[in-house]
Amino acid sequence: MPKRIDTLKAIVFDFDGVILESHDIKTEAFLALFADHSDRLEEIRSYHLHNVGISRYVKFEHIMREILGLPYTEADRERLGAGFARLTHERILACPEVPGARELLRGLRGRVLRAVASGTPQDELRQIVGERSMTEWFDELWGTPRTKPDILCDVLIRHRLSPAQVLMVGDGMSDYKAAQETGVRFLAREAGLVFAGMDVDKVRDLVQMAQWLAEAIH
């Protein structure tokens, strides 16, 4: 049973893999972008999966410089960014929601601040949410180039909240680390083995998160 959170005022959600079942779409896109380097694809996959939730542009630079040993130019940044968007956009618009997302987020309206902290670029995030008719689900949408710790700190300061009043929900270590850095509580959406063996509260989807919240909040 979760520890009670009697003062919860804000929930900050990661987006891919927490709101939408889009995790695998982005993994496949990274592998497709670097398909010419077949001998390094497993290393690229591992790097991506261990850094879910950070900016794709940070990943592009690391893959080019550190894994492939190649220079990384502004032209590479633009080429890879455009290719990634081409490979993912339509699939993300069509992919299913995480079970329970619609009901949970609508049910939280007016009860707590509903925010998103995503590794997706800000403009692209807003476009996806708008095109999927999900705008009413959220009070705030934040993406890159802002980092998740920065977004959480901003939520704390602007809304005059203490860390105990904020919950971060994520499926990647970047989400967990952001929560640790800012002192807010963390809930894992566990769709893989990212949090195996870790002492964190976990839910399989947002249906179970609704049950978790019902136990944690008066």
Image (tube, rainbow, N blue to C red):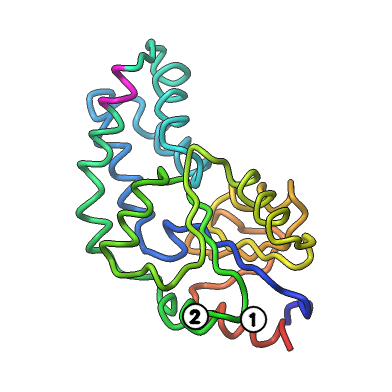
Residue 30: percent from left, percent from top: 32, 37
Image quadrant occupied by the C terminus: bottom right
When asked about the image quadrant of residue 198, the answer is bottom right
Magenta stretch contains residue 141: no
Residue type at the position of mark 2 = Leu
Image quadrant occupied by the N terminus: bottom right
SS of the residue under disc 1: helix
Mark 2 neighbour class, 10 Å CA radius: few under 14, some 14 to 19, many 20 or more: some
Instruction: Name the residue rendered at 59%, 48% in the picture.
Output: 173
Kindly report the secondary structure that dominates the magenta region of the rendered protein: helix
| Horizontal side of residue 46 vs 203, given as left or right | left
**Circle 2 sits on which residue?**
104
Q: Is 37 drawn above or below residue 186 in the view shown? A: above
**Residue span colored magenta:** 75-79
Residue 117: percent from left, percent from top: 53, 53
| Pick the front one: 177 or 66 | 177
Instruction: Name the residue rendered at 51%, 61% in the picture.
Output: 140
SS of the residue under disc 2: helix
